[in-house]
Image (cartoon, rainbow, N blue to C red):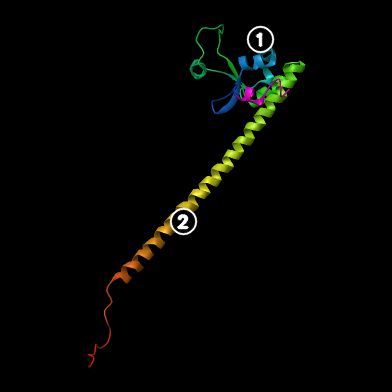
Amino acid sequence: MNKLMPIERIENKIYFIRGQKVMIDSDLAKLYGVRTKNLNKAVSRNPKRFPADFMFQLTQQEHDNMRFQNGTSKRGGRRYQPYAFTEQGLAMLSSVLHSEKAAEVNIQIMRTFVKLRTVLATNKDLTYLFKELKHKVDRHDTEIGLIIKAIEKMIATEAKPKTNIGFITKKED
């Protein structure tokens, strides 16, 4: 399955809409090897399996933004706005699409979402480490600056001419 459906191909079909990672019905239909209309029919026959947090329909503006980002034209056969499926909705799709390919594609999609979560978690860890490092570097910069000022003061005091202390006597010939 990895050779047939590389994770990168699925990653490119995951969008961030309304604060959620989602996949669009037409992209899913292509991955599953079915028509978008048939995928949506299977979903509409099982409305209890797809609550609003599993699936939602894009607004015209969201759809236009996607078209702009993807560089597709307005001409096309869609008469309605696409549906977006969250990760939970994608998992639920396997229960309404009854084919071997659907099961294989769903497994690969779930693996992709797990990989993305891992990457995001790693990025959060790295972000935390970079903040800590920046804090340490800033603190060290301050400390180094104080050391340099102290050295400069020491040099400035040593540069003053020394005055003799005590008595000066004349040498006798």
The answer to which image quadrant residue 27 occupies is top right
The answer to which image quadrant residue 45 occupies is top right
Sooner in the amino-acid sequence: mark 1 or mark 2:
1
The answer to which image quadrant residue 155 occupies is bottom left
Which mark is on residue 109?
Answer: none
- As displayed, is residue 69 above or below residue 157? above
Q: How many marks?
A: 2
Placement of the N terminus among the 4 image quadrants: top right
Q: Where is mark 1, residue-wise?
A: 35
Badge 2 marks a residue whose secondary structure is helix
Q: Where is mark 2, residue-wise?
A: 140
Placement of the C terminus among the 4 image quadrants: bottom left
**What's the residue type where badge 2 is placed?**
His
Query: Residue 149, image x and y in percent?
Result: 36, 62
Most extreme residue toward the front, as rendered?
173
Question: Could you say which is closer to the camera, residue 170 or residue 16?
Answer: 170
Query: Residue 143, image x and y in percent?
Result: 44, 59
- Residue plotted at (55% across, 45% down): 128
What stretch of residues is rendered in magenta? 1-11
- Density class for disc 2 (Cα within 10 Å; few <14, some 14-19, many ≥20) is few
Left or right for 158, reference 126 = left
